[in-house]
Image (tube, rainbow, N blue to C red):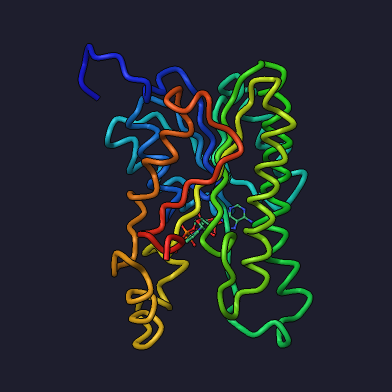
Amino acid sequence: MTAGIPSMFDLSGRVCVVTGGGRGIGKAIAAALAAHGATVVITGRTQATLDAAAAEMAGSGATVDAIAADVANEDDVARLARIVEERHGGAQVLVNNAGINAIYKKAEDTTLSEWNEIIATNLTGVFLTCRAFGRSMLEAGSGSIVTISSIGGRVGLAKTAPYCASKGGVELLTRSLAIDWAPRGVRVNTVAPAYVETDLTAGLASHPVLGERIVQRTPMHRFGQPDEIAGAVVFLASDASLYVTGQTIGVDGGWTAA
Ligand code: NAP
């Protein structure tokens, strides 16, 4: 930011928790929030990944804390919220980015445990973290929560029924929380990316047929980059979006316009 010019995107003095912040889109979001002045807490299941990401960001001048937690585990999420309260006095921003898509197969071949694993992380995990951090935001009378959905939460995609169901659930959970919490100063919005180059899509991007099919189907004719998702999150986290709640911003190269 340019020194001396007040910015409605300034996040100085705010604590932002980013789930799945150790790599991929979450890491890019955490770096962007930190670049706008926030203290960032990154979380995920793997402490070593988090420590490496925190060290990299700290090298660029960011203030970053790294706390391992599984968003699908209620006790872990409660412990995370307690540590953030103790170390940082709570969080003003929560970004629910942690997500998985462990399988690409037809619904009739999908097992219950595959279904449960994806729903537990992608949907129940968002509920648990929103509830844990939402409580203290409601007490404080302000806060911004951003969930990361997907084009798969807005249109059906082949061979990803549990993933699409989880992300569609995230979109409606977001709107429902937005309505419940709007009178008490807590905003809840969604960012819905299309295909972005990360570990999650590495198999698709390198696939000779599917990778090309995705590129052709995307109006911008390319995969997105993690950094390109972060701007919308900074907007929704900041005072630039004070009158915005219950909305979805598609950051999808035009996918859902077609
Ligand atoms: P990624 O590179 O695979 O990273 C996923 C992150 O989530 C990792 O940091 C991972 O850390 C964390 N995570 C997974 N399960 C977790 C759990 N149970 N508890 C806590 N953390 C967990 O994925 P990505 O592509 O960056 O995706 C990030 C988000 O964007 C996801 O919600 C995804 O659905 C969404 N999205 C991605 C794309 C895309 O094309 N890449 C498109 C649309 C939406 P650990 O493994 O260490 O726990």
Residue 200, x across and y down, in percent: 47, 67
* Residue sitting at x 71%, y 87%: 109
Is 99 left, or right, of 220 in this rendering? right
User: In this rendering, does residue 22 appear at all?
Assistant: no
Q: Residue 56: where, in percent of width, then height?
A: 32, 43
The answer to whether residue 161 is seen in the rendering is yes
113 in relation to 256, above or below: below
In this view, the residue in front, 113 or 254, is 254
Q: Residue at x 62, y 66 (%)?
A: 164
- What is the x, y in percent for residue 40? 46, 32
The front one of 62 and 244 is 244
Image: 38 above or below 174: above
Q: Quadrant of residue 145?
A: top right
The quadrant holding residue 110 is bottom right
Q: Which residue is pictured at 56% across the width and 50% down the height? A: 44
Q: Quadrant of residue 187?
A: top right
Q: Viewed as shown, does residue 243 lie left or right of 217?
A: right
